[in-house]
Image (spheres, grey):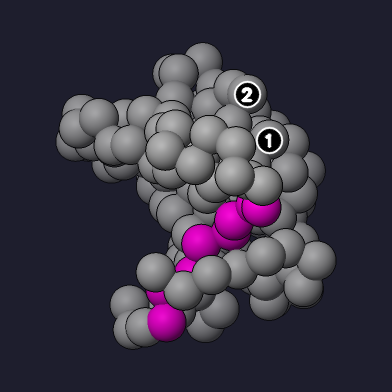
Amino acid sequence: MNQFKIISSYLNQNEVHLTGEAELRETLRDFLKYGNNVVLLEFPGYGILTIGIGTPYGFVEYMDDNGSPPYLVAAVDMKNQEKDAFVEFDSGGTPTPIALENCLPFERVVDIAEYFLMNKKLPEDTNWIEV
């Protein structure tokens, strides 16, 4: 498998280089100890996932290697419930609100990241919207 890395959103922007899905899962779970936070998962040649890590919710956004549109975010159908609700994530020391409709259970976030690495594409069973 190709090498990929996770970059924390904090000022020191620690990089963790990874080589497999099991290591990815463990590292994402380890980041939970910092509370709701944001990391970047870079997979050269396939794109970048911005991942919100938190409990019970996280989020996933996608952009290609060049940072060019379209930018995609995983979304859920709120069925008119809590459409104005937000979950706050720490991105480099800045509180960043993410609409609840763009939040997923944390384990689903981990599954999406793993799928992306294994298949080199976004999962088709996820609702992706352009932002």
Q: Quadrant of the C terminus?
A: bottom left
Q: Where is residue 117 in the image (x, y as percent from the top left)?
A: 69, 64
Residue under the point 52% across and 49% down:
102
Q: Quadrant of the N terminus?
A: bottom right
Residue 58 lies left or right of residue 96; in this view the side is right
Residue 122 lies left or right of residue 38; in this view the side is right
Task: Specify the segment rendered in magenta.
Answer: 70-77
Whether tag 1 and tag 2 are in contact, CB under 8 A, the answer is yes
Of the image marks 1 and 2, the number of the one nearer the N terminus: 2
Residue type at numbered disc 2: Pro
Q: In this view, does 6 lie above or below 55?
A: below
Residue under the point 66% across and 34% down:
106
- Image quarter for residue 30? top right
Report crowding for label 2: few under 14, some 14 to 19, many 20 or more residues within 10 A (C-alpha): few
- Image quarter for residue 13? top left
Looking at the picture, tell me which residue is in the foreground, 5 or 59: 59
Residue type at numbered disc 1: Pro
Looking at the picture, tell me which residue is in the foreground, 123 or 26: 123
Q: Position of residue 123 (x, y in %)?
A: 75, 68
**Mark 1 sits on what residue?**
105
Looking at the picture, tell me which residue is in the foreground, 39 or 80: 80
**Mark 2 sits on what residue?**
56
Dot 1: what SS? strand
Residue 76 covered by magenta stretch = yes
Residue 117 covered by magenta stretch = no
Q: Is residue 104 above or below residue 70?
A: above
Residue 124 lies left or right of residue 85; in this view the side is right
Q: Position of residue 111 (x, y in %)?
A: 75, 49
Tell me if residue 19 can be seen.
Answer: yes
